[in-house]
Amino acid sequence: MFAFWVVAGLISAAAAFLVLHTAARAAVNAGSEDPTLALYRRQLGEIDDLADRGLIAQSERKGAHAEAARRLLTAADAGAAPWRVDAGMRRVLLLVAGLAPVLALGLYLAVGSPGYPDQGFKSRLATWRAAEPSSLSPPEMAAVLEAMTLERPKDPEAFRYLAMAQAASDNPSGAARALRRAIELSPRQADLWELLGEALVAQAGGEATPESSRAFAQAVKLDPKIVNARFYLGRARIAAGDKVGGIAAWRALQAELAPADPRRAALGQAIAEAERGPSPAAPLAGQMGAIRGMVANLAAKLEANPGDPEGWTRLVRSYAVLGETEKRDAALATARKRFAADPDVLKALDLAAKTERMR
């Protein structure tokens, strides 16, 4: 703290010196010639030079020369008003320059917190890591998980959880970076490619991009049955103007779903909306119906196979995005009870529950 005040005092003294030095130089040059005269003299010389090189006609030379000469004579006749230095003002200036840092210090001592200890990032990070995950905000959780990736640089799941935290922190760019790293470690996981595509869509404001389509295509290549990636690829084709191709892809996806699968009806609604809609983009209502169907299917899968921690995390996050708080809390309670012995899963679940509702 002492060093801070020394540096602050030196900076204030340097600023005061610059002000006083500039004022002193102005006082020394108070009686110098008006610089306007030199400007007009230089203009006369430039006019003559242009005329000698043939760049302006002699008639133009005479007119420009006369105008510059007239301005020169007017400035010479007016004269430069001398700048008078008031000795009393010097004392006032010195007093103000000296009192400014003193007043700033007094104001800080009165309303600031000079005794408050420094909170370095490392100390805050240690506090967050020791805290209950449910008490952390998404950015704080992202900082904790980013530290975990440094400790576990070869674990793709650590980067997956970091991506979830970044997404919940409204940082799709950070989520995409984390997912790219996870894919480098485990390039054969179709769901990581799918999540990367979704992060890139979010980064682009909900619009499909060539990069997101490539990620979805890679997910489908690794797992031809993957649903979300195929849905997004169909939507991208429709948005690009290939309504026939996009709807055909959706119909193929719909045909592969079981008759009892709720996503089948949701896709049918999306297809109908796309066929009726004047825009080649997939309508929001159809997309939301398909998404709700996918979430319902995930819940059914977890009911049959409840030992999937990643599935529970995605289900909790999905309910949070849809704004279905009761279902979110119920799924969170069930998952926390099942994975009570796994702190990493608990952190991911709590982070997923804090995901903001989609608007």
Image: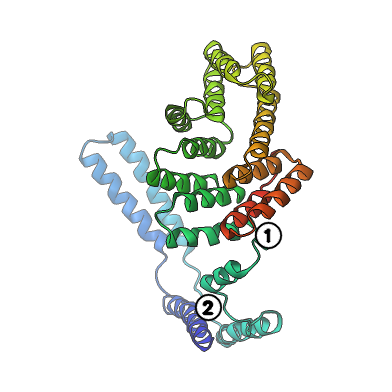
Query: Which numbered disc, 2 or 1, marks the residue that appears first in the sequence?
Result: 2
Horizontal and vertical percent position of residue 350: 66, 54
Q: Is residue 343 above or below residue 121?
A: above
The amino acid on which the numbered mark 2 sits, given as a three-letter code, is Arg
Reading the image, the residue beneath label 1 is 134
Viewed as shown, does residue 284 lie left or right of 232? right
The quarter in which the N terminus is drawn is bottom right
Tell me the tag on residue 296.
Answer: none
CA distance separating discs 2 and 1:
70 Å
Q: Residue at x 58, y 36 (%)?
A: 205
Q: Is residue 208 above or below residue 359?
A: above
Q: Residue at x 69, y 25 (%)?
A: 262
Horizontal and vertical percent position of residue 200: 51, 37
Q: Is residue 146 above or below residue 238?
A: below
Q: What SS does tag 2 mark?
A: loop
Horizontal and vertical percent position of residue 343: 59, 60
Outermost left residue: 53
Tell me the tag on residue 84.
Answer: 2
